[in-house]
C-alpha cells in the first residue's frame, strides 16, 4: 500500500471520528429536557435560616389566613416547576470529545420572578408597596408574581427580581426586541453607582431587584416606541471576575452591540425554562423586600422561591449567562 493511500485512510478515519463526536454531542443537546423539576435543588443553594441573621429586619406578623396560605405556597420546599421552553445556544461551540465536554459542564439553576404592579388587596396589608403615579396623584401598589410567558400590556408597570445561584460579579443588560427579529441598542442596567454603591458582588441566595425599590421610579412602564415592539430582552451574567472595560455611572450605560453579541456567543449555552405550577397573582413578601434591600442578606431555604427557574449547562470557571425575555402584547 502506498504512503499516499495510507495518508488518505488516516484523514478519512479522523474525519469520521470528528463527525461522530459532533453528531453525538448534537444528539445529546437535542434530547428533551426533564419535563418537571422540584425546587429542592435550587433551594439547597441557599443558606439555612440559622446561618443568616445580619441585616434581617423585624418583619410584620401575618394574621390574615389567606395571606398565610399564599405565602405557604411560594415557600413550599417541594414546589413543582413545569418545562415551558428550551432555548438553544446561539452558536454552539464544539471542542474536544463528548466525554471531555460533559466533564467540564455543570448543571446550574438561576431564579427569576417577573412582577406586575397592581392595587393592594384588602388581605395584603403586610405586602410591600411601591409609589405609583396615577395622573397627578400617587397611589401605593404592590407587585404580584407572573410567569415567564406573560404578555404584558401597554401601560403595565413591571419589575423583576433575579436570584444568584453562584458567587461572582453580576451584570444585567437590557434591550428592546422587535417582531422582525431585530433588537435595539443595549443598556447595562446593573450595576450602577446608584444601586449598592456599584458593588455587584453576589452569592447564592442574593436577591437583586430591577429597578431597585429605592429608585425614584421603582418600576418600568410598558411604552412601545415602535409599532412592532415585542418586548424586552435581558441578559444576566455572573462572572467569576469583574468584566473588563466597564466604568460605572449613576445611570445605565450603553453597551455596543458587538460586545453583547460576543458575550452571548462565548458564554451562553442551551437554556431550559421552568415556571412554577402555582403562585401567580401572589403579592411580594416582606422577606423578599428585606433580602433585596440589605446587601449582606441572602434569602434562606425557608423563604419564598422564584416563580421561574432557568436551568443551564455552564462551566464553573466561566461566566454563567441567562438570557430571557419579557414579552409585550402587540394587539
Image (tube, helix red, strand yellow):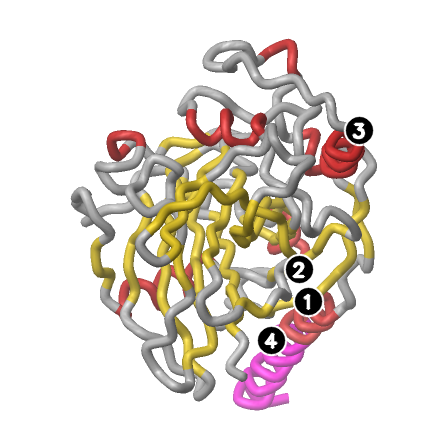
Q: How far apart are marks 3 and 4 (CA)?
A: 68 Å
Which comes before the other along the chain, label 2 or label 1? 1
Question: In the displayed structure, does residue 66 sit left or right of residue 129?
Answer: right
Residue that badge 2 annotates:
272
Q: Where is residue 199 in the image (x, y as percent from the top left)?
A: 30, 31
Nearer to us in this view, 104 or 40: 40
The residue at 60%/11% (across/down) is: 51
Q: Which residue lies furthest to the front in this view?
A: 136
Give yes or no for contact between labels 2 and 1 (Cβ–Cβ under 8 Å): yes
| Label 2 crowd (10 A; few <14 / some 14-19 / many >=20) | many
Q: Residue 194 appears in which quarter of the rendering?
A: top left
Q: Say the numbered circle drawn on residue 52.
A: none
Residue 14 lies in magenta, yes or no?
yes
Q: How many labels does the image show?
A: 4
Q: Residues in magenta?
A: 1-20
Provide the residue designation for mark 3: 65
Q: Earlier in the sequence, mark 1 or mark 3?
A: 3
Q: In which quarter of the image is the N terminus?
A: bottom right
For mark 1, what is the residue?
85
Q: Which of marks 4 and 1 is nearer the N terminus?
A: 4
How far is the residue under mark 4 from the one under mark 2? 33 Å
- CA separation in Å, label 4 and label 1: 36 Å
Mark closest to the chain's N terminus, 4 or 2: 4
Amino acid at each position: 500500500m502506498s504512503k499516499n493511500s495510507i495518508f488518505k485512510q488516516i484523514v478519512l478515519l479522523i474525519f469520521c471520528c470528528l463527525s461522530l463526536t459532533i453528531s453525538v454531542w448534537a444528539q445529546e443537546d437535542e434530547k428533551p429536557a426533564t419535563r418537571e423539576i422540584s425546587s429542592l435543588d435550587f433551594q439547597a443553594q441557599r443558606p439555612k435560616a440559622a446561618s443568616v441573621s445580619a441585616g434581617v429586619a423585624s418583619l410584620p406578623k401575618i394574621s390574615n389566613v389567606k395571606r398565610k396560605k399564599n405565602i405557604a405556597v411560594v415557600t413550599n420546599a417541594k414546589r413543582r416547576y413545569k418545562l415551558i421552553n428550551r432555548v438553544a445556544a446561539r452558536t454552539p461551540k464544539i471542542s474536544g470529545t463528548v466525554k471531555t465536554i460533559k466533564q467540564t459542564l455543570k448543571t446550574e439553576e438561576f431564579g427569576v420572578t417577573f412582577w406586575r404592579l397592581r392595587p393592594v388587596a384588602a388581605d395584603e396589608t403586610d405586602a410591600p408597596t411601591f409609589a405609583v403615579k396615577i395622573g397627578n396623584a400617587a397611589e401605593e401598589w404592590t407587585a404580584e408574581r407572573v410567569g415567564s410567558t406573560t404578555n404584558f400590556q401597554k401601560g403595565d408597570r413591571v419589575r423583576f427580581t433575579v436570584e444568584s445561584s453562584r458567587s461572582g460579579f453580576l451584570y444585567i443588560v437590557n434591550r428592546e426586541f422587535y417582531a422582525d427579529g431585530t433588537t435595539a441598542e443595549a443598556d447595562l442596567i446593573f450595576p450602577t453607582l446608584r444601586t449598592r454603591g456599584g458593588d455587584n458582588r453576589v452569592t447564592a441566595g442574593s436577591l437583586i431587584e430591577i429597578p431597585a425599590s429605592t429608585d425614584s421610579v421603582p418600576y418600568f412602564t410598558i411604552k412601545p416606541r415602535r409599532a412592532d415592539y415585542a418586548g424586552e430582552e435581558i441578559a444576566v451574567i455572573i462572572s467569576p471576575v469583574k468584566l473588563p472595560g466597564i466604568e460605572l455611572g449613576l445611570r445605565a450605560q450603553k453597551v455596543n452591540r458587538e460586545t453583547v453579541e460576543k458575550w452571548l456567543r462565548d458564554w451562553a449555552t442551551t437554556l431550559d425554562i421552568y415556571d412554577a405550577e402555582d403562585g401567580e397573582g401572589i403579592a411580594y413578601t416582606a422577606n423578599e423586600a428585606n433580602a433585596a434591600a440589605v446587601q449582606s442578606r441572602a434569602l434562606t431555604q425557608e423563604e419564598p422561591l422564584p416563580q421561574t427557574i432557568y436551568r443551564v449547562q455552564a462551566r464553573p470557571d466561566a461566566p454563567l449567562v441567562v438570557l430571557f425575555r419579557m414579552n409585550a402584547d402587540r394587539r
